[in-house]
Image (cartoon, coloured by chain):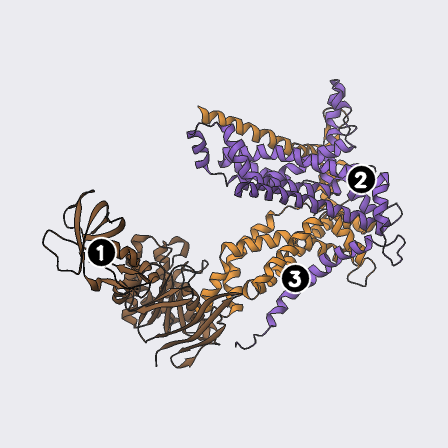
Amino acid sequence: MKKKQSIKYLFALLPFLILVGLFEVLPVISIIVRSFMPQGGAIGVTLENYIRIFTTKLYQSAIWNSLFIAVCSSAIGLAVAFFGAKAAYEKGGTAKKIFMSILNMVSNFSGVPLAFAYIIMLGNTGVFTLIGQKLRIGFLAEFPLYSVVGLMITYIYFQIPLAALLLIPAFESIKKEWKDAVGLLGGSSRTFWFKVGLPVLMPSILGTFSTMFANAISAYATAYALVMNNLSILPIRISEQFVGDVVQNPQLGGALAVVLMLLMVLSILINEKILQGNRRKRHA
Amino acid sequence: MHKKKKGIGNGLVLWIIGIYLLFPLLLTFLYSLFTEWITILPEGFSLNGYAELFQDSYFWQSIGRSLLISIVPIVLCTVAVLLAMYVVVVYLPGLDKIMRTICTIPYAIQGVILPISVLGLYANAPEPFSNRVFMLVCTYCIVVLPYIYQGVRNNLNAVHAPRLLEAAQMLGAGKFYAFWKIILPNITSGIMVCGKLFPDRTDVSVLSHAPVGSACQRGYCGPVRRDAADFSGSFRTAER
Amino acid sequence: MSYIEFKNINKFYGENQVLKNISLNVEKGQFVTLLGPSGCGKSTLLRCLSGLEEISSGQIIMDGKDITDLEPRDRNIGMVFQHYSLFPNMTVEENIAFGLKMKKKSKQEIAKKVKEAMEMVELTGKEKEYPDNLSGGQQQRVALARSIVQEPKVLLLDEPLSAIDAKLRKSLQNSIKEVHKKLGLTSIFVTHDQDEAMVMSDTIHLFHEGKIEQSSDPITMYTSPVSKFAAAFIGNYNILTEQEFEKVTGRKIHSPEGIAIRPETLQISDGKTPEAEYVFEGVITDNTPKGNVLQYHVDVNGIPLKVDVVFRSKVLFENGNRIRISVADHNCIRL
């Protein structure tokens, strides 16, 4: 029988537990609890907030817009980033280093500054808008920046560096020997990528998509700076329940936040399901 | 022949993406150098915008505040995580799974959700909780938590912390000494790098925009006027 | 009274019992090897002695003292690990000096002892190097020096050569034996390599599924395995069932667990009538050169046998040749 060890070391856990308990666990629990409470602050359990969300056009469109923008910007951003990462991996050397530096630098360029940049490019008196008007290019002249499409273009911008930075390390796992083997067996570069490269990278690609989706669907600053309250997306609808000109309704805000959280968790679960399916196929 | 072709193709892709990404930045910079831009080409080159900015005390205050609010949470969070990892690695390895879950949850509450929850919970609480800067710093701690945890964990794995601990114990060191004097020095360089790498994509601006009120907002985010120079300046201060 | 006594050691990992009532004695100054396949419990027992693992029940006595409840650092035991576990942020010198620093020895004493230790492991000149600039073999020498410099009562070596290239292994084996001889340290060595065990040890304890299968000196372990497992693990035995033995030799003997015959004890007769108890004929099916030994694969009435001969000049028998083999009864070990 070993003599009882002193448990003094448990005190080292305290800072972490306090920090996480007060600012992660408690807030999340409170927002979930609040979402089931009736508007006005009375104590009780009700589903009225959720019912309201799913029956009111305003909130339905918020959910739909958020999903649409998140999925599309993630998909497009991922595609662009994939080719960028692949090019960086194949080129290697200084070019890759410079590319990664650009990615790192640009990945911080989001929110208000990004919105501003796009406004001066494609806004009502933006440079490209003016060029479009001069040269009669209808698409540029009337570019709908302050809409879902405009927001999506802006989101794609900051999704690309995020995805590329996540994908470039993934390419390191592609072994040159596999390419050689495919070549020796009579396959082309396309064959390699479709039959070997992409399947091997699939977990990283899906994981990256998941991260991008979460990033896009919860982004607030860029959207607010660009369209303020005029476009219905979840983060804006959530924050206006707590601050701003609209009547405060923290309970509804809580419910909206829970919906947003569920959407993000859902994307992770779908991700996992697809990966599991792949694994099962392999071991079948 | 084949290789050269590939190199050009890849180089082209990198160029295109690189330019696409850098263009808005460069344009913003150009915008800050001219006073008028209503036709295709700008007019009136002037560095006055910057001169004004650098002389504005609010600007420097907001830079200082931003730096503070960036650095303090990173330090706090790192210390908290290191202390917790000390317990997990040396005494209770079973806790690692729980820690990993706790440090992954912030991904699901990123963006608006966390600041709004914190706000809702502590806005009417006693000091210091209702202090906006306090809330901001603590929320930011949670935002960076996954990155710091990942960084510390990766470093501990790379250095094979349990093996070093065992060797140190066999040589007469206590567990405490072994962790803080042997393992920590081997991971500090890694942590430094991690601190620079994690994306600053923190929409904690919600917290600063919303509850902080206009006075503090000016202080934190810099004068948010639709003036060319001001905007270029506030690009450095917002979102940190 | 032995120097180290393990008394009825049991160890559980959850439901899994890894050590089953192990009782073992080690005499002072001996070089003892714990041998066995992966997962048999040998490393676990070593780590229990070091204090890095706790035993579920039993007692460990060292030099007359019960050390069962002592912390590793209070047991005065040195340990060398499979992956060296050198401190990457310290030079070779600092690594070796670490244990002495913990004991708060004076600077001069530390310098002197470190120099001696480095000479003993033949690493002089590498004092200021960092571990990742050294080869695997050199790193392990540093680890060895680091353990012996604190003058422990016992030295534990947990598969120290498994991560090292085959060629380098030989020289390190010699270094370890040298150190053991010079310092007279009681040493316990864990390995899964039977050749290594035989080269290095005074006594070998063969582990199988948490129990000790056999404990003896290397020669006895090699020539007289007590069970099928022991015979299969040590050396290259031909293991036959009773029926197979009858098929080969034409004679019946009683040994339900089987009969083990060493390949080198099967004599290929050169024409003269052999004087062994069992004589039979077989056909050569293949041969495998193994350096200084040539192994013939022989088919005797459908039973494959391996026959080892010292490789003097050339392969004497071709595939398809019919040969006569003899073996003495005392070389047919009943298991």
Can you identify the residue that label 2 sits on? A62
Q: In the rendered structure, which amino acid carries the disc numbered 3?
A: Phe
Depth check, front residue: C308 or C328: C328
Q: Position of residue B186 (x, y in %)?
A: 50, 58
The chain letter corresponding to purple is A
Please say whether residue B210 is visible from this viewpoint: no
Above or below C95: residue A138: above
Q: Position of residue B98 (x, y in %)?
A: 63, 59
What tint does the image give chain C? brown
C-alpha span from label 1 to label 3: 77 Å
Mark 2 and 1 residues: CB-CB less than 8 Å, in contact?
A: no
Q: Chain of mark 1?
A: C
Characterize the local packing of mark 1: few (<14), some (14-19) or many (20 or more) Cα atoms within 10 angstroms. Answer: few
Depth check, front residue: A86 or A251: A251
Q: Secondary structure at mark 1?
A: loop
Task: Give the quarter of the image for residue A44.
Answer: bottom right
Can you identify the residue that label 3 sits on? A16
Q: Chain of mark 3?
A: A
Of tags 2 and 1, the one toward the viewer is 1
